Image: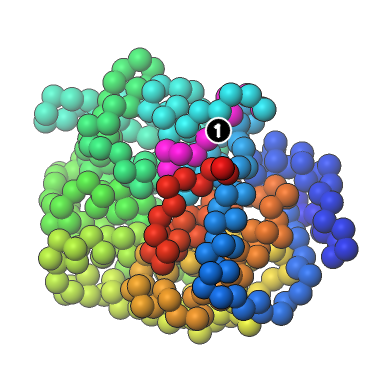
Amino acid sequence: MASPTSTTNRTVTAAITLLLLFSGCGNETVRPDSDEPKLSSVDEVRGQLDKALESTFQRRLNLRHHAAWQILHGALAFQREFLVEKEPGGETVSAVNHLLNGGRMKGWTTEPGTLQENGRRGLRAVLEAGSKAGQGHADQWLAVLAQCNLEPEQPIVVDGDIYTMSDYLNQVQWDVARNVDREYSWTLIGLTAYLPVDATWTAADGRVWNIERLVQIELDQELASSACGGSHRLIGLAMALNRHLAQGGELKGAWQQADARIQQAIEDAHRFQNADGSFSTNYFARPGNSPDLAQNLGTTGHTLEFLTLAMTNEQLNQPWVQRAVSNLCELFRSTQNIPLECGKLYHAAHGLVLYRQRVFGARHSYALK
């Protein structure tokens, strides 16, 4: 699955192209020209950001060769603006709108849920653990759609039946006890986008659940053994904590523990940062680097995504964070003509999008003019 790239010749081999069709966005080993750190001015960083995001936006997935796992990672970064081709090289449509309007997509697997107290049927997204086509983690699709800022009454058409985001949300609440892996990273992102953080509900196990209980379960898990070095758990905790504080919540109980976990992860990301500005390939556990540009893009991108959600504006403007952003933009430049695995690519792009919004303000569009 690896394809080395010469330092004097960036030509992508035919084998890499075939990987795009096989795995979605490709998976490769790319070696850097230099490990020397590159320092940039604030204006240069903004220019690098926009160029990296514009180029990434122009990458095209298609409904014939790519599946929901790959496509919805693109929607995470670019929301409803993210385009997908119906056929290779053919007409493009908004990937999110395509799904909402009842369009087919491999890996978008749903089923009617339980009959709710309001008389409506819930909508359940089927879990396909470890999948690189369907929903690989509990409530992953809810988290992506919630970050697309869909209204609670947004219709979702499935096989001719019309559900709403509220129907989907209610089913997730009912099913929280079914999460045997006790992985609530994406659940927290989705639920806190729509519910008051002090909300309570009764789930299928007959017990009363609330957001703080989900936070505590997440805190009980090991970061290093979790998906992507625990970055997803930290992102879920950070988004839930932000919403808790925005709603007047206090730092006590599980919330105080969540804040401590987040602050420690920020410190570890800085402590283990590499000399070139990239973050550790071992995430928050220990130092680490790799000659594989794609791996560095994924680990630095996931870490930056967490930091942009967890840090204050003052912290985000610190030189060490700017150096990481500049390094990530250079990684995008170096790999712009190379197929990349979609999780790494679009989580890194999402990190840049969030940094751009926080530090420079949001772009109206990432499409090339």
Residue 152 position in % (x across, y down)? 23, 37
Q: Is residue 133 above or below residue 28?
A: above
At x 43%, y 76%, the residue is: 317
Q: Which residues are magenta?
A: 79-88
318 lies left or right of 180: right
For label 1, the residue is: 84
What color scheme is it? rainbow
Q: Secondary structure at mark 1?
A: strand
At x 77%, y 41%, the residue is: 17
Q: Quadrant of residue 50?
A: bottom right
Q: Crowding near pointer 1: few (<14 within 10 Å), some, many (20+)?
A: many
Residue 340 position in % (x across, y down)? 66, 50
- Foreground pick, 114 / 247: 247
At x 62%, y 49%, the residue is: 55
Residue 85 position in % (x across, y down)? 59, 29
- The residue type indicated by label 1 comes to Val
Q: Is residue 233 magenta?
A: no
In this view, the residue farthest toward the top is: 160
Q: Assign the C terminus to one quadrant of the image.
A: top right
